[in-house]
Amino acid sequence: MSVSIRPRPAARRRPSLRALCLGLSAALACAAGMASNAPADDVCHGQAAEIAPGIKRSVAAYPMPAVSLTRADGKRLSAAEALDDGRPVMLNFVYTSCNTICPVTSQVFMQTRELLGAQREQVNMVSISIDPEQDTPRKLNSYARRYAAAGAWAHYTGSNAESVAMQRAFSAWRGDKMNHLPLTFLRAAPGQPWVRLDGFASPEQLLAEYRRMVAAR
Protein backbone atom coordinates (compact mmCIF):
# COMPACT_ATOMS: atom_id res chain seq x y z
CA MET A 1 0.00 0.00 0.00
CA SER A 2 1.45 3.33 -1.01
CA VAL A 3 1.25 6.20 1.40
CA SER A 4 0.85 9.68 0.03
CA ILE A 5 2.75 12.25 2.03
CA ARG A 6 1.48 15.75 1.55
CA PRO A 7 4.04 18.50 2.03
CA ARG A 8 3.45 20.81 4.95
CA PRO A 9 2.50 24.33 4.02
CA ALA A 10 5.35 26.75 4.43
CA ALA A 11 5.30 28.57 7.73
CA ARG A 12 4.37 32.20 7.49
CA ARG A 13 7.34 34.30 8.48
CA ARG A 14 6.81 37.47 10.42
CA PRO A 15 8.32 40.50 8.72
CA SER A 16 11.58 41.60 10.27
CA LEU A 17 12.04 45.01 11.82
CA ARG A 18 14.32 45.92 8.91
CA ALA A 19 11.68 44.91 6.36
CA LEU A 20 9.04 46.95 8.18
CA CYS A 21 11.34 49.97 8.23
CA LEU A 22 12.07 49.72 4.51
CA GLY A 23 8.40 49.33 3.64
CA LEU A 24 7.34 52.26 5.78
CA SER A 25 10.19 54.38 4.44
CA ALA A 26 8.96 53.83 0.89
CA ALA A 27 5.40 54.68 1.88
CA LEU A 28 6.51 57.84 3.66
CA ALA A 29 8.55 58.92 0.66
CA CYS A 30 5.45 58.66 -1.52
CA ALA A 31 3.37 60.56 1.02
CA ALA A 32 5.99 63.29 1.29
CA GLY A 33 5.97 63.70 -2.45
CA MET A 34 2.21 64.27 -2.44
CA ALA A 35 2.11 66.57 0.59
CA SER A 36 1.91 70.27 -0.16
CA ASN A 37 0.95 71.89 3.16
CA ALA A 38 3.44 70.61 5.72
CA PRO A 39 4.47 73.26 8.27
CA ALA A 40 7.93 74.74 8.02
CA ASP A 41 8.95 73.00 11.25
CA ASP A 42 9.73 69.78 9.38
CA VAL A 43 12.87 71.29 7.81
CA CYS A 44 16.09 69.86 9.23
CA HIS A 45 18.56 72.21 10.83
CA GLY A 46 22.18 71.94 9.78
CA GLN A 47 23.59 70.11 6.79
CA ALA A 48 21.90 66.73 6.40
CA ALA A 49 23.89 63.80 5.04
CA GLU A 50 22.40 60.50 3.94
CA ILE A 51 24.09 57.80 6.03
CA ALA A 52 21.97 54.91 4.74
CA PRO A 53 19.07 54.50 2.32
CA GLY A 54 16.20 56.57 3.68
CA ILE A 55 18.15 57.89 6.70
CA LYS A 56 19.60 61.39 6.95
CA ARG A 57 21.85 62.69 9.71
CA SER A 58 22.23 66.31 10.75
CA VAL A 59 23.54 68.18 13.78
CA ALA A 60 21.76 71.11 15.43
CA ALA A 61 21.54 73.06 18.68
CA TYR A 62 17.89 72.91 19.72
CA PRO A 63 16.80 75.42 22.40
CA MET A 64 15.06 73.84 25.39
CA PRO A 65 11.53 75.26 25.79
CA ALA A 66 10.46 76.49 29.22
CA VAL A 67 7.64 73.97 29.62
CA SER A 68 6.86 71.10 31.94
CA LEU A 69 5.88 67.54 31.03
CA THR A 70 4.02 64.79 32.85
CA ARG A 71 5.84 61.47 33.15
CA ALA A 72 3.91 58.22 32.79
CA ASP A 73 3.99 57.81 36.58
CA GLY A 74 2.21 61.16 36.97
CA LYS A 75 5.22 63.21 38.09
CA ARG A 76 5.59 66.69 36.61
CA LEU A 77 9.07 67.66 35.43
CA SER A 78 10.42 70.59 33.49
CA ALA A 79 11.74 69.77 30.04
CA ALA A 80 15.22 70.54 31.33
CA GLU A 81 14.78 68.12 34.26
CA ALA A 82 13.57 65.42 31.88
CA LEU A 83 16.44 65.80 29.42
CA ASP A 84 19.36 67.46 31.20
CA ASP A 85 20.30 64.95 33.91
CA GLY A 86 23.89 64.62 32.70
CA ARG A 87 23.50 61.38 30.77
CA PRO A 88 23.48 60.90 27.00
CA VAL A 89 19.94 61.22 25.64
CA MET A 90 17.95 59.40 22.96
CA LEU A 91 14.64 61.09 22.18
CA ASN A 92 11.68 60.36 19.94
CA PHE A 93 8.05 61.45 19.54
CA VAL A 94 5.20 58.92 19.63
CA TYR A 95 1.51 58.50 20.34
CA THR A 96 -0.15 55.42 21.74
CA SER A 97 -2.85 54.91 19.09
CA CYS A 98 -0.37 55.11 16.21
CA ASN A 99 -0.24 51.88 14.20
CA THR A 100 2.43 52.74 11.63
CA ILE A 101 5.54 54.68 12.62
CA CYS A 102 5.42 54.58 16.42
CA PRO A 103 5.34 50.79 16.91
CA VAL A 104 8.47 50.55 14.77
CA THR A 105 10.39 53.38 16.45
CA SER A 106 9.38 52.10 19.89
CA GLN A 107 10.56 48.61 18.97
CA VAL A 108 13.84 50.13 17.80
CA PHE A 109 14.27 51.79 21.19
CA MET A 110 13.45 48.51 22.92
CA GLN A 111 16.04 46.61 20.88
CA THR A 112 18.59 49.38 21.35
CA ARG A 113 18.23 48.95 25.12
CA GLU A 114 18.83 45.23 24.67
CA LEU A 115 21.99 45.94 22.67
CA LEU A 116 23.21 48.37 25.33
CA GLY A 117 23.08 45.58 27.90
CA ALA A 118 24.54 46.68 31.22
CA GLN A 119 24.95 50.22 29.87
CA ARG A 120 21.22 50.73 29.28
CA GLU A 121 20.68 52.69 32.50
CA GLN A 122 23.46 55.08 31.49
CA VAL A 123 21.35 56.39 28.60
CA ASN A 124 18.36 58.65 29.21
CA MET A 125 15.77 57.42 26.69
CA VAL A 126 12.78 59.73 26.31
CA SER A 127 9.54 59.33 24.34
CA ILE A 128 7.19 62.34 24.21
CA SER A 129 3.55 62.05 23.17
CA ILE A 130 2.30 64.13 20.26
CA ASP A 131 -1.31 63.27 21.18
CA PRO A 132 -1.45 64.46 24.80
CA GLU A 133 -5.22 64.93 24.85
CA GLN A 134 -5.63 61.16 24.46
CA ASP A 135 -2.35 59.93 25.93
CA THR A 136 -2.97 60.09 29.66
CA PRO A 137 -0.24 58.89 32.03
CA ARG A 138 -2.21 55.66 32.43
CA LYS A 139 -2.26 55.05 28.67
CA LEU A 140 1.43 55.86 28.42
CA ASN A 141 2.18 53.40 31.20
CA SER A 142 0.36 50.66 29.33
CA TYR A 143 2.15 51.58 26.09
CA ALA A 144 5.53 51.60 27.84
CA ARG A 145 4.96 48.13 29.29
CA ARG A 146 4.24 46.84 25.79
CA TYR A 147 7.85 47.64 24.88
CA ALA A 148 9.40 46.68 28.21
CA ALA A 149 10.19 50.33 28.88
CA ALA A 150 11.41 50.84 32.42
CA GLY A 151 14.17 52.50 34.35
CA ALA A 152 16.03 54.89 32.08
CA TRP A 153 13.35 54.89 29.35
CA ALA A 154 10.63 57.36 30.32
CA HIS A 155 7.44 58.37 28.50
CA TYR A 156 6.00 61.87 28.83
CA THR A 157 2.74 63.63 28.05
CA GLY A 158 1.35 67.04 29.02
CA SER A 159 -0.97 69.68 27.63
CA ASN A 160 -1.36 70.18 23.91
CA ALA A 161 0.58 73.45 24.16
CA GLU A 162 3.44 71.72 25.99
CA SER A 163 3.63 68.93 23.43
CA VAL A 164 3.59 71.35 20.50
CA ALA A 165 6.29 73.47 22.17
CA MET A 166 8.54 70.41 22.44
CA GLN A 167 7.88 69.41 18.83
CA ARG A 168 8.56 72.93 17.59
CA ALA A 169 11.76 73.13 19.64
CA PHE A 170 13.08 70.06 17.79
CA SER A 171 11.69 71.11 14.38
CA ALA A 172 9.42 68.08 14.50
CA TRP A 173 5.98 69.69 14.48
CA ARG A 174 3.93 69.02 11.35
CA GLY A 175 0.54 70.38 12.31
CA ASP A 176 -1.18 67.05 12.90
CA LYS A 177 -0.17 63.76 14.48
CA MET A 178 -1.08 61.91 11.29
CA ASN A 179 1.68 63.79 9.46
CA HIS A 180 4.47 62.99 11.88
CA LEU A 181 7.73 61.49 10.68
CA PRO A 182 10.18 58.93 12.12
CA LEU A 183 12.74 61.07 13.93
CA THR A 184 15.35 60.24 16.54
CA PHE A 185 17.46 62.76 18.43
CA LEU A 186 20.66 61.96 20.32
CA ARG A 187 22.85 64.14 22.51
CA ALA A 188 26.02 63.28 24.40
CA ALA A 189 25.56 65.71 27.30
CA PRO A 190 23.73 68.91 28.29
CA GLY A 191 24.98 71.91 26.33
CA GLN A 192 26.19 69.85 23.39
CA PRO A 193 24.49 69.78 19.98
CA TRP A 194 21.90 67.19 19.04
CA VAL A 195 22.28 64.60 16.33
CA ARG A 196 19.07 64.28 14.35
CA LEU A 197 18.28 61.12 12.38
CA ASP A 198 15.45 61.43 9.87
CA GLY A 199 14.08 58.02 8.89
CA PHE A 200 13.86 54.57 10.38
CA ALA A 201 17.26 54.17 12.01
CA SER A 202 17.99 50.61 13.15
CA PRO A 203 18.99 49.63 16.70
CA GLU A 204 22.51 49.00 15.41
CA GLN A 205 22.68 52.49 13.90
CA LEU A 206 21.49 54.10 17.14
CA LEU A 207 24.04 52.12 19.11
CA ALA A 208 26.84 53.15 16.74
CA GLU A 209 25.77 56.80 16.96
CA TYR A 210 25.68 56.58 20.76
CA ARG A 211 29.15 55.07 20.95
CA ARG A 212 30.51 57.69 18.55
CA MET A 213 29.06 60.49 20.67
CA VAL A 214 30.32 59.12 23.96
CA ALA A 215 33.81 58.57 22.57
CA ALA A 216 33.98 62.15 21.26
CA ARG A 217 32.80 64.01 24.35
Image: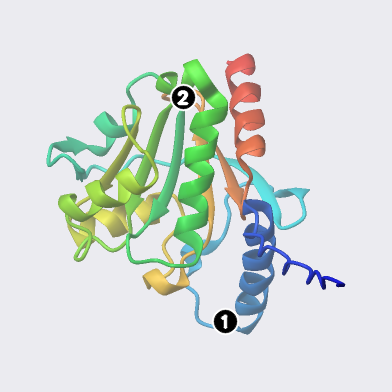
Q: Residues within 10 Å of mark 1 (few under 14, many from 20)?
A: few
Tag 1 or tag 2, which sits nearer the N-term? Answer: 1
Q: Position of residue 51 (x, y in %)?
A: 76, 45
Task: Pick the quarter of the image with the C terminus.
Answer: top right
Q: Is residue 198 above or below residue 26?
A: above
Q: Is residue 134 left or right of residue 177?
A: left
Query: Which amino acid type is shown beneath numbered disc 2?
Result: Pro
Q: Is residue 22 above or below residue 33?
A: above
Q: Which residue is mark 2?
A: 88
Q: Which residue is mark 1?
A: 35
Q: Position of residue 57 (x, y in %)?
A: 66, 45
Q: Residues within 10 Å of mark 2 (few under 14, many from 20)?
A: some
**Residue found 68% across the figure and 51% down from its top:** 56
Q: Position of residue 125 (x, y in %)?
A: 41, 34
Task: Pick the quarter of the image with the N terminus.
Answer: bottom right
Residue 82 image-quadrant placement: top left
**Residue found 61% across the figure and 71% down from its top:** 28
